[in-house]
Amino acid sequence: MQTSLSSSSSSDTKPEMKEHCDHRADCLKMIQLILDGEATEQQLAGVKANLESCKPCIEMYHLEQEVKELLTKRIEKRCCPEQLVATIKSRILTFS
Ligand SMILES: [Zn+2]
């Protein structure tokens, strides 16, 4: 038996990713196009279909979205701690 350590934020356990993305560079490019609002409807449809079967890229999409929101807020309100941005960026790096 293990002693249960009561940590308040233990949501760090990652589920095993069996799905592997063979086209991560393309996925990332498309994700950035979408977040920049530069993707065409055709591209959007293609990426959507692709992301549904691509777990790593779904996570990447959400992280990119988070960062973009943070950066936008930071520009608008100038109250977002740089450390928070750095934390999220380092989380993205663990995916690549
Ligand atoms: Zn992918």
Image: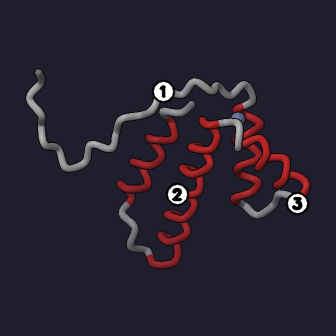
Q: Which mark is residue 41?
A: 3
- The residue shown at (84%, 53%) is 45
Q: Quadrant of ligand 1?
A: top right
User: Which residue appears farthest toward the right when viewing the image?
Assistant: 42
- Residue sitting at x 86%, y 51%: 43
Determine crowd level at label 3: few under 14, some 14-19, many 20+ residues with C-alpha closer than 10 A.
few
User: What residue sits 82% from the left and 55% below the top?
Assistant: 44
Which residue in the structure is indicated by mark 2?
66
Where is residue 19? Give x, y as percent.
63, 27
- The residue most toward the left is 3
Mark 1 Cα within 10 Å, few/some/many (few <14, many 20+)?
A: few
What SS does tag 1 mark?
Answer: loop
Task: Measure the alpha-carbon separation of dots 1 and 2.
Answer: 22 Å
> Which quarter of the image is occupied by the N terminus?
top left
Distance in Å between CA atoms under marks 3 and 1: 32 Å
Mark 2 closeness class: few <14, some 14–19, many ≥20 residues within 10 Å: some
Most foreground residue, 93 or 24: 24
Choose the circle earlier in sequence order: 3 or 1: 1
Disc 1 + disc 2, Cβ < 8 Å: no
Give the mark toward the camera: 3 or 1.
1
**Mark 1 Cβ inside 8 Å of ligand 1:** no
Which image quadrant is residue 51 in?
top right
Which residue is tagged 1?
16
